[in-house]
């Protein structure tokens, strides 16, 4: 490794990484990374792996956005997750993409179906995306969706996906539901005073009238927000109505679910290493320079920077998709 990376007397101040063969190998590896990150969604969708852990990645991305704004992270609610799954399944089954179904079923129907009593609730939808980070970026780029993700009123979240067809093409529906559960008000139970034997009294929990009224007011407010939806957009999201947090995905799940971002980070790391090696090669012994090796080094650095641009703009993915289809 010393011969290969560190310039010095042992290699005449010419690291072997900056020779012709190494340049070709590195260029091939970079090209392979771009192609593999573009093919990953197709492979994951066909294997079924994406559908298993994709929602957990979106939860982490949502919490990351909230923590960056000094907001408390959201905890996953099993009830909201079930409500999101029911809504996603309904859209996939009937082939529609809207907060309100063709039969007039609102988002609050699915929340009520799982018996989730709430003070605040909201819904984000997405369709025609392949990467979890792309979905999250699109939501954050939309004012209404961003307001949901960064709302201080929400404390819980549930996310689900369903595969189906929309306007004659295969796609994946994404449903993100936010909520804040209504406080549970216990009803005092008076224990009847009797002599032994003693009777065990079970506490009955009910929802007070005040909370019911708040829930109703919130539903009316959210439905007014839904009136301005752009429901025909595809490939974009619809308008929707503190430091430290637990990750819902492991590091290897994150890499699998976010190949585009993982490759981007790898390219940034490679660019940093190559730049550092070039600086060492130039300044460790400035009297001894190897123009050909330097040109190879700058060529590799240029390839990496171009690859980062192609990755961030999605040009590499579009090229691979056009080649395949």
Image (cartoon, rainbow, N blue to C red):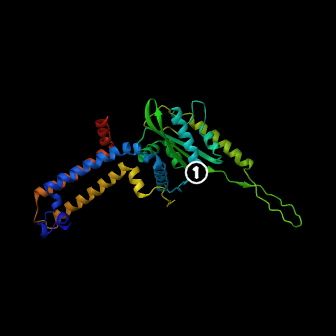
Q: Residue furthest right?
A: 195
The quarter of the picture where residue 286 lies is bottom left
In-image side of 187 versus 126 (left or right)? right
**Residue 312 appears in the figure:** no
| Image quarter of the N terminus | bottom left
Where residue 221 appears, as percent x and y from the top left, is 62, 40
Give the residue at mark 1: 78
Q: How many marks?
A: 1
In-image side of 23 versus 124 (left or right)? left
Where residue 212 appears, as percent x and y from the top left, is 71, 46
Element under label 1?
A: helix
- For residue 293, above or below residue 173: below
Residue at x-position 36% and y-position 50%: 259
- For residue 97, above or below residue 123: above
In-image side of 264 versus 75 (left or right)? left
Where residue 106 appears, as percent x and y from the top left, is 60, 36
């Amino acid at each position: 490794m010393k011969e290969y990376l560190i310039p010095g007397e042992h290699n005449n101040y010419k690291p072997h990484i900056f020779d012709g063969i190494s340049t070709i190998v590195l260029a091939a590896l970079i090209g392979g990374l771009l192609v593999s990150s573009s093919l990953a969604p197709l492979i994951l969708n066909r294997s079924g792996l994406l559908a298993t852990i994709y929602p957990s990645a979106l939860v982490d991305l949502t919490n990351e956005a909230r923590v960056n704004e000094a907001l408390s992270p959201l905890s996953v609610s099993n009830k909201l997750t079930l409500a999101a799954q029911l809504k996603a399944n309904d859209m996939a089954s009937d082939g529609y993409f809207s907060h309100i179904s063709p039969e007039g079923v609102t988002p609050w129907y699915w929340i009520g179906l799982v018996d989730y009593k709430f003070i605040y609730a909201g819904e984000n939808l997405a369709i025609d995306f392949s990467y979890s980070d792309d979905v999250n970026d699109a939501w954050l780029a939309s004012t209404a969706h961003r307001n949901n993700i960064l709302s201080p009123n929400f404390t819980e979240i549930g996310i689900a996906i369903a595969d189906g067809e929309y306007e004659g093409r295969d796609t994946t529906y994404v449903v993100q539901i936010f909520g804040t559960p209504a406080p549970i008000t216990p009803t005092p139970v008076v224990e009847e005073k009797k002599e032994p034997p003693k009777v065990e009294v079970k506490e009955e929990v009910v929802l007070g009238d005040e909370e019911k009224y708040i829930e109703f007011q919130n539903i009316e407010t959210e439905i007014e927000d839904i009136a301005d939806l752009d429901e025909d957009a595809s490939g974009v999201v619809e308008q929707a109505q503190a430091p430290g947090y637990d990750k819902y995905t492991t590091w290897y799940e994150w890499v699998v679910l976010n190949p585009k971002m993982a490759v981007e980070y790898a390219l940034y790391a490679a660019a940093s290493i190559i730049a550092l090696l070039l600086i060492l090669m130039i300044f460790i012994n400035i009297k001894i320079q190897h123009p050909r090796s330097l040109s190879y080094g700058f060529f590799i650095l240029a390839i990496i920077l171009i690859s980062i641009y192609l990755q961030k703009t999605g040009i590499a993915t579009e090229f691979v998709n056009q080649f395949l289809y």
